[in-house]
Image (tube, rainbow, N blue to C red):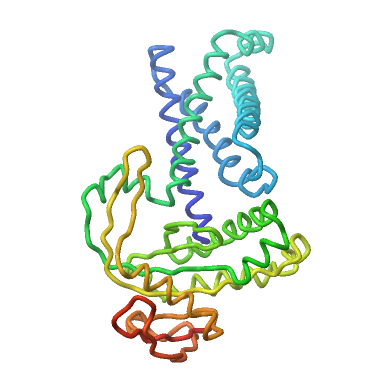
Amino acid sequence: MRPDLSRKLKNLALICLFTSIAGMIYQVIDDKVLDFRSVIVGFPLGLAFGVLELFLFPKTKLLRRWSFSKMLVFKAVTYTAVIYGVTIVLMLIMGLAEGRKVQELWVYLVSPTQLILVIYTLAIYSLLVFLLQVNSLLGEGVLWKFIRGKYHKPREEERIFMFLDMKSSTAAAEHLGHIRFYTLMNDLFHEISQPVLKTKAEIYQYVGDEVVLTWEMKDGLENSNCLKLFFLFREILLQKSDEYWRDFGFRPQFKAGVHLGKVITAQIGDLKREIVYNGDVLNTTSRIQHECNKYQRDCLVSGSLMQHLKQVNAFKWEKVDTVLLRGKETEVELFSVNG
């Protein structure tokens, strides 16, 4: 199963569980009883909301470009329609099974009780969407790290980093203008989601036209994930090259530097909190990536990382040079890798 599909199905299951529990709470408060009807209402509502939020809306480019307020109004109207639609279907099924007349069901649909149910359901789902959006803004899994307090105190760990930068970005920005260039970068960063999930990477930062990615050691070394991401992303760009040329008059290409080392990981900030990595490995990785231009290579890997990687998955290695990077006291071996 594709990693992104597996992730969405897990989130869908959590949404259905959350709405089912919310339905049970509502029934206990409203009817002072608890039976199967609360789950019968809560589960299909969660299923409908989850399918829209996880599978349909993200695939629509137009929705991704809407403002927050416009999206808020659209979703409020859509989800209200879904609530009434699901309620009508369920009431017809259960009501007719209990021998009620259609007129009785209609009276209930326009009653204050139904209005309260709609408001309650929208409030519950707004909380769910909020949590999903926070998780998306922070990065996959980062919200859970904040909740657990994993990095409340600084800790040292060894990680792999990749600095992934677009080639000829200055020329592209001048050709496209700021607005269209932003649209291009937004589409490209959307494309990288699938390789990130497949290779267990974490997106640390977006810096202009550059993405900084990181792995825990075991995840990055497993199946050479820290290299596979670059070639998976490049394959996507090659497949959609004509589409980008048609839309932007530009065929995007990226270069990457990859390195490993120890960092201090900690949660910092008060008004704005984030998890940051501090260590020489980040500066070194950035400078390795800059060497791609000098040696005309797409992906350069440090010798220290290369020694940890098994030469598998049909990667082709070539030692490029041993260099003294700017600001460093010791030389670094550079290896070019191709898929």
In this rendering, the answer to whether 24 lies above or below 155 is above
Most extreme residue toward the front, as rendered? 327
* Residue 2 or residue 339, whichever sits in front: 339
Identify which residue is drawn at 24% across, 47% down: 152
Residue 125 image position (x, y, % from top left): 50, 30
* Residue 27 or residue 227, whichever sits in front: 227
Identify which residue is drawn at 48% across, 80% down: 291
Quarter occupied by residue 100: top right
In this rendering, the answer to whether 337 lies above or below 15 is below
Please state if 194 lies on the left or on the right of 172 as rendered.
left
* Residue 18 or residue 257, whichever sits in front: 257
Identify which residue is drawn at 63% across, 45% down: 64
Identify which residue is drawn at 66% across, 40% down: 66
Residue 17 image position (x, y, % from top left): 43, 36
Q: Is residue 339 visible?
A: no
Q: Is residue 268 visible?
A: yes
Residue 61 image position (x, y, % from top left): 68, 48
Quarter occupied by residue 325: bottom left
Please state if 291 lies on the left or on the right of 171 as rendered.
left
Label total for image = 0
Residue 306 image position (x, y, % from top left): 37, 83
In this rendering, the answer to whether 260 lies above or below 144 is below
